[in-house]
Image: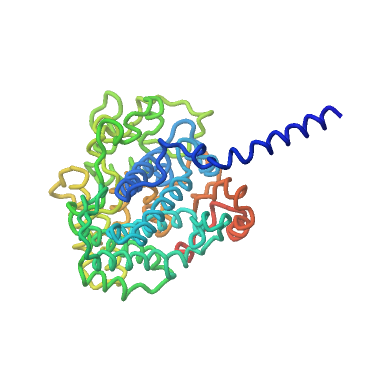
């Protein structure tokens, strides 16, 4: 009886206060110090920096384990290919969607207000770029229905990877639309917030066309891309020089520094040279080894790597016997770039396209050009005899030219997210190793698993996607990698 009386009094009291509250509800519940909108320039800068910073960190702690550049000596379930247990990194899904969401807001602002129209082209290019990263890692993902929470779509369907690449509103379409938007823009507003190109819209077109080359080549095993590739190549409006690279340079100090440069030394020293890196770099007598790694303790000029995926509970090693990562990732990290797209990548993509007969071009010239540009990118002098050495000379001494191209691309991409692993999944090159203590039955993963949040928050659509991948298996190839 008392509980009923108290409940009734409480309801009456609340009812009595309702009219007084609703009169000023919005005023009372609005923080006058919190922004409710953001200038496109600030949003644009945030997207570019946050994606680059986060993916550079992911490259170091996760991508370089899957790509077998580094080995993790402890806290290394990810290195042992238990990808559903990310530790230092290995769960790029949240920041990819966060930046895609912010980019969608930027795109909507550009289309809703003519004063912001200058941002439409770059926003479309970035949408294509980040969507490619997302689908390359996971396969089918929410795309056409994603980022529509305000419209009431909170359980978006998963689009097929093929549609994400080739359908209207997909990667290739958005690159074309982004280029057209830049070419058609006649306004006077500057492209502020552009930390890649300082507002130079013409260079965004170079970036977009290099991304077209990359995207077309990535799906070339499933789609006839020859005419489209030849068109881009013939027009020649892509990244050809390192001065046109889509990159930004880290600073030594916060807030624009490379994250691992200020990490605890114990965390930083968990990552050492892999056996794969040791063998490839030493076999080719590649001087970039001294940029990427440090000599073993007390042994100048000596580099030693460890096979990926050791069982830390059974591991007994002396770290002094192995090579830590180079000073460019720590003491000299202001020499490091967040990498979106470069001349050397573009050249090596074209070398492969030429070798496979997809563009009419001299494959050897683009191969050697790509290597030269990669050495310059890493501030390393190209030895006079490197391009003619027995294992590097194009197609000589029984070498497979495609494997040579992919190996050189791998060597240059140590700071480029998951690219080394992704290209291995597409081509099988370079030849990665069976890891030491695999938690995946000795198999190299073929895709990233969908995160647990999807099964909890997007249950019905997640189950459909999981069913297509053998219960979200990391061993089911993505569309462009299936043969």
Residue 229 locus on image (x, y percent): 30, 70
Image-based side of 91 in relation to 302, left or right: right
Q: Nearer the viewer, residue 114 or 386?
A: 114
State whether residue 240 appears in this view.
yes
Which residue is found at the position 43% from the left and 26% from the top?
A: 317
Q: Residue furthest bottom?
A: 227
Measured along the vertical axis of the image, is residue 31 above or below residue 417? above
- Of residues 275 and 71, the one nearer the viewer is 71
The answer to whether residue 300 is above or below residue 434 is: above
In the rendered structure, the answer to whether residue 472 lies left or right of residue 223 reads: right
Q: Position of residue 466 (x, y in %)?
A: 60, 56
The N terminus, quarter of image: top right
255 lies above or below 126: above
Colour scheme of this structure image? rainbow
Identified at 25% across, 47% down, the residue is 195
Judge left or right: residue 291 versus residue 155.
left
Identify which residue, 113 or 329, lies in the foreground. Answer: 113
The location of residue 321, given as percent across then percent down, is 35, 27
Residue found farthest to the left:
384
Would you identify the image quadrant in which residue 251 lies?
top left
Q: Position of residue 451 (x, y in %)?
A: 55, 47
Residue reaching furthest right?
1
Name which quarter of the figure residue 397 lies in. Answer: bottom left
The answer to whether residue 414 of the structure is visible from this angle is no
**Total labels drawn:** 0
């Amino acid at each position: 009886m008392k509980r009923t009386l108290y409940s009734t009094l409480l309801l009456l009291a609340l009812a009595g206060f309702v009219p007084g509250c609703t009169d000023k509800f919005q005023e009372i519940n609005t923080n006058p110090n919190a922004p409710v909108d953001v200038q496109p320039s600030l949003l644009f800068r945030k997207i570019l920096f946050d994606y680059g910073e986060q993916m550079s960190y992911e490259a170091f702690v996760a991508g370089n384990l899957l790509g077998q550049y580094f080995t993790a000596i402890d806290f290394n379930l990810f290195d042992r290919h238990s990808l559903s247990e990310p530790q230092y990194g290995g769960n790029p899904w949240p920041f990819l969607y966060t930046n895609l969401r912010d980019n969608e807001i930027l795109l909507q602002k550009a289309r809703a207000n003519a004063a912001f129209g200058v941002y439409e082209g770059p926003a479309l290019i970035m949408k294509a770029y980040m969507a490619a990263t997302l689908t390359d890692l996971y396969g089918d993902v929410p795309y056409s229905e994603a980022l529509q929470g305000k419209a009431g779509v909170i359980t978006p369907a998963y689009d097929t990877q093929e549609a994400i690449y080739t359908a209207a509103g997909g990667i290739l379409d958005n690159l074309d639309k982004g280029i057209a938007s830049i070419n058609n823009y006649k306004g006077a507003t500057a492209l502020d917030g552009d930390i890649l190109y300082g507002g130079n819209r013409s260079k965004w077109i170079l970036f977009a066309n290099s991304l077209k080359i990359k995207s077309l080549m990535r799906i070339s095993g499933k789609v006839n891309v020859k005419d489209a590739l030849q068109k881009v190549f013939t027009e020649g409006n892509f990244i050809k020089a390192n001065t046109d690279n889509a990159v930004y340079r880290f600073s030594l100090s916060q807030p624009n520094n490379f994250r691992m440069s200020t990490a605890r030394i114990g965390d930083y020293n968990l990552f050492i040279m892999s056996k794969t890196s040791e063998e490839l770099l030493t076999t080719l007598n590649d001087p970039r080894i001294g940029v990427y790694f440090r000599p073993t303790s007390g042994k100048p000029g000596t580099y030693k790597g460890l096979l990926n995926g050791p069982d830390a509970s059974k591991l007994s090693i002396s770290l002094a016997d192995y090579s830590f990562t180079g000073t460019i990732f720590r003491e000299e990290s202001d020499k490091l770039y967040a990498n979106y797209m470069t001349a050397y990548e573009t050249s090596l993509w074209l070398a492969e396209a030429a070798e496979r007969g997809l563009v009419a071009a001299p494959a050897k010239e683009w191969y050697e050009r790509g290597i030269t540009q990669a050495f310059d990118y890493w501030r390393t002098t190209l030895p006079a005899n490197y391009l003619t050495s027995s294992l590097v000379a194009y197609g000589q001494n029984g070498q497979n030219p495609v494997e040579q191209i992919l190996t050189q691309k791998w060597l240059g991409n140590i700071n480029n997210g998951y690219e080394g692993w992704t290209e291995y999944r597409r081509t099988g090159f370079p030849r990665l190793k069976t890891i030491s203590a695999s938690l995946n039955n000795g198999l190299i993963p073929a895709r990233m698993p969908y995160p647990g949040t999807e099964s909890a928050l997007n249950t019905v659509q997640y189950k459909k996607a999981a069913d297509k991948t053998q219960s979200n298996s990391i061993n089911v190839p993505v569309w462009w990698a299936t043969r």
